Amino acid sequence: MAKQPESDSFMDMFGRFGRDLKVPNVDVEAILAHHRKNLEALEKSARAGAAGATSLLSRQREMLQDTLREIADMAQSYRAPGNPQELMAKQTEFARKSFEAALKNAGEVAELARKSGTESIEILRARIKDAMEEIRAGYGQK
C-alpha cells in the first residue's frame, strides 16, 4: 500500500475520498469550498478576538501604570509637612480622582471588550448569512 505524503490536509483527503467514491450528483468541490469558507471565517473571527484581547490587556496595563504613578505622586505629597486641613483636602481630592479614573477606566475596558466581541460575532454572522444564501442557491439549481 502506497504511503500518502504527511502534508495532506484534511480537506485534501476529504476531496480525494469524495472523488474516489464517484458518488453521482455530489459536487465535492462545492462542499469543500463551503467548509473552507467556514474554517476561514472561524480563523478570521479568532484572530479578531485575539487582537481585541491583546489591545484590552495593553490598555489595562497602561491604566495600572497610570494608577501606580498617581499613588506614588500622592505618597510624595504626604511627606510634605502641612496642616491637617490640607492633608484632608489632598486625601479627598485623591479619592475623588481615583473614583473618577476607576469609572472612566471601567467604561473604557467594557467598550473595548464589547467592540472586540462584536467584531468577532459579526464575522461569523456574515459567514452564516452567506452559507444560508449558498444553500438556498443550491436548492434553486435542482
Image (spheres, grey):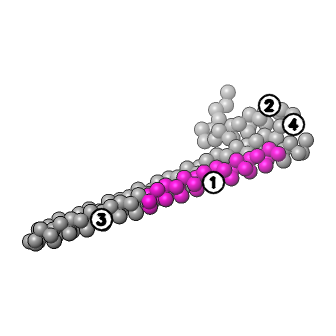
**Image vertical order of residue 84 relative to residue 33, above or below:** below
Mark 3 or mark 2, whichever is nearer to me:
3
- Residue 134 percent location from the top left of the image: 79, 47
Residue 138, relative to residue 107: is it above or below?
above
| Amino acid type at mark 2 | Leu
- The residue pinned by badge 1 equals 122
Residue under label 3: 96
Badge 4 is on which residue? 25
CA gap, disc 1 to disc 4? Answer: 34 Å
Q: Quarter of the image holding residue 86?
A: bottom left
- Residue 109: x and y in percent read 44, 58
Secondary structure beneath dot 2 equals helix
Estimate the spatial distance between the alpha carbons at disc 4 and disc 2, rounded to whole Å.
Answer: 12 Å
Q: Is residue 33 visible?
A: no
Above or below, 98 against 15 in this view is below
> Which amino acid does the dot numbered 4 rest on?
Asn
Residue appearing at x 10%, y 72% in the figure: 82
Which circle, 4 or 2, is nearer the viewer? Answer: 4
Range of residues picked out in magenta:
107-136
| Front disc: 1 or 4 | 1
Q: Residue furthest top?
A: 1
- Identified at 74% across, 47% down, the residue is 131
Residue at the image point whose x is 58% and y is 56% from the top: 119
Residue 8 occupies which quadrant of the picture? top right
Q: Which residue is mark 2?
A: 21
Residue farthest to the right? 142
Are the residues at dot 3 and dot 1 in contact (C-beta closer than 8 Å)?
Answer: no
| Earlier-in-chain disc, 2 versus 1 | 2
- Disc 2 residue crowd, few under 14, some 14–19, many 20+, Cα 10 Å: few
Q: CA distance from mark 2 to mark 1?
A: 37 Å
